[in-house]
Image: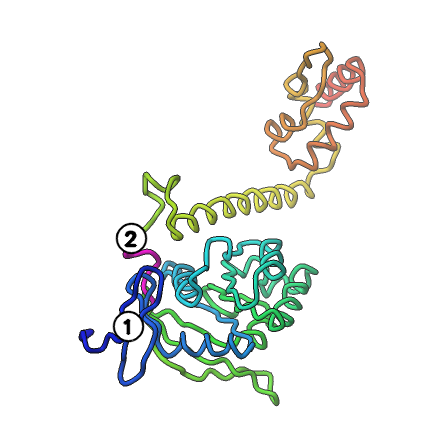
């Protein structure tokens, strides 16, 4: 229980107050959370231009991303949704454009720094950027289920702290210390951490997904969920296209062309000038092929006259 005599300076709006906890004076704000030993430590490292890359790990649904964003906003009152990167280009732009000391939350980093894709030039560039990030002093917070999902160089050499979420808003903090003599990393317990859930003082909802006001919501939590939804939908589309491309490797171009003859009349549309053209979008939708294959089929059909197409259709039907 917080006693009135423990409050040294009241928190006002977004300005932090100060309170005494077990003899130590720490920053405090009921809106942003409680700054304990760990927040002081990170602020000190930032001021000393030391790297402060932190991984927030824990089981799915334990609010790792919310905690990382909430803690980042507590450390930096100017932190906004613009500081949350969900793609590689976003991350690079933030590293270049943000002022010195501003925090970046790299959400779901396993998509761009995954251990199974270490060989990609994008991943190698990300590792190089994090290595040199100390020169611009941009602490990077990475929410991920398990640090082993990250590239080995990142998880063993470029992370300074691990915040292990034990429950929503509660965590154990460890200092990650790579051994200079062996291929291993030591974990040293630092402290326990309590993080106020993101915007809980402004919205009592557990989830944003069923909120009727999400489209208009301007809370950081709502902005994050909308951004994440957009990025995730784009990833689903990319994954679908990849799976279709994998499937198409088993189907020859000639077989796709045969399938196209079954829907040939549906591919054509008439322009305002009366010319007949073939739609690659219709090919992709009707055949279920990738955009690349649809363009290739369109180019092939485009070079044929209507008579040639009709002749090939007859031959196709005879083969059947």
User: Magenta region, mostly helix, strand or loop?
Assistant: loop
Point out the tag, 2 or 1, that comes first from the N-terminus. 1
Q: Is residue 22 rendered to the left or right of residue 134? A: left
Q: Is residue 301 rendered to the left or right of residue 175? A: right
Task: Note whether 186 is above or below 53 in the view shown.
Answer: below
Question: Which residue, given by chain and number where applicable, does mark 2 sit on?
Answer: 202
Residue 158 figure quarter: bottom right
> Residue 247 at what x, y percent from top left?
63, 42
Task: Note whether 257 is above or below 180 in the view shown.
Answer: above
What secondary structure is found at the residue carrying circle 1? strand
Q: Is residue 288 rendered to the left or right of residue 230? A: right
Q: From which residue to which does the magenta span run?
A: 195-202
Q: CA distance from mark 2 to mark 1?
A: 23 Å
> Residue 26 at what x, y percent from top left?
33, 77
Question: Which residue, given by chain and number where applicable, does mark 1 sit on?
Answer: 9
Residue 77 figure quarter: bottom left
In the image as oriented, which residue stretches furthest toward the bottom? 181
Which residue shows up at 37% across the image and 76% down it?
A: 172
Check if residue 307 falls in the magenta segment: no
Viewer-closest of 41 and 284 = 41
Viewer-closest of 271 and 295 = 271
Neighbours of disc 2 within 10 Å: few (<14), some (14-19), many (20+): few
Quadrant of the rendering where the N terminus is positioned: bottom left
Neighbours of disc 1 within 10 Å: few (<14), some (14-19), many (20+): few
What secondary structure is found at the residue carrying circle 2? loop
Which residue shows up at 46% across the image and 59% down it?
A: 79
């Amino acid at each position: 229980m917080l006693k009135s005599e423990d409050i040294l300076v009241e928190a006002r709006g977004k300005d932090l107050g100060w309170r005494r906890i077990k003899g130590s004076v720490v920053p405090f704000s009921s809106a942003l959370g409680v700054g304990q030993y760990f927040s002081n430590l990170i602020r000190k490292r930032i001021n000393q231009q030391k790297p402060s890359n932190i991984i927030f790990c824990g089981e799915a649904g334990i609010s790792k991303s919310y905690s990382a964003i909430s803690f980042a906003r507590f450390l930096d009152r100017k932190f906004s949704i613009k500081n949350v990167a969900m793609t590689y280009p976003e991350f690079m732009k933030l590293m270049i454009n943000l002022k010195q000391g501003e925090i970046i939350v790299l959400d779901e980093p396993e998509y761009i720094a995954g251990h199974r894709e270490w060989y990609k030039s994008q991943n190698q560039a990300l590792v190089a950027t994090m290595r040199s990030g100390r020169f611009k002093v941009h602490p990077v917070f990475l929410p991920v289920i398990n640090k082993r999902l990250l590239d080995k160089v990142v998880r063993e050499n470029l992370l300074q702290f691990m915040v292990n979420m034990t429950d929503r808003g509660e965590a154990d903090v460890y200092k990650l210390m790579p051994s200079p003599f062996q291929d291993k990393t030591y974990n040293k317990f630092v402290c326990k951490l309590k993080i106020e859930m993101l915007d809980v003082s402004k919205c009592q909802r557990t989830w944003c997904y069923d909120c009727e006001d999400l489209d208009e919501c301007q809370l950081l939590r709502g902005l994050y969920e909308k951004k994440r939804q957009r990025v995730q939908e784009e990833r689903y589309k990319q994954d679908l296209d990849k799976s279709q491309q994998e499937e198409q490797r088993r189907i020859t171009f000639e077989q796709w062309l045969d399938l196209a003859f079954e829907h040939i009349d549906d591919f054509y549309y008439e322009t305002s000038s009366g010319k007949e053209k073939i739609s690659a979008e219709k090919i992709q939708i009707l055949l279920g092929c990738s955009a690349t294959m649809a363009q290739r089929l369109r180019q092939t059909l485009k070079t044929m006259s209507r008579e040639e197409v009709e002749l090939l259709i007859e031959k196709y039907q005879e083969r059947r």
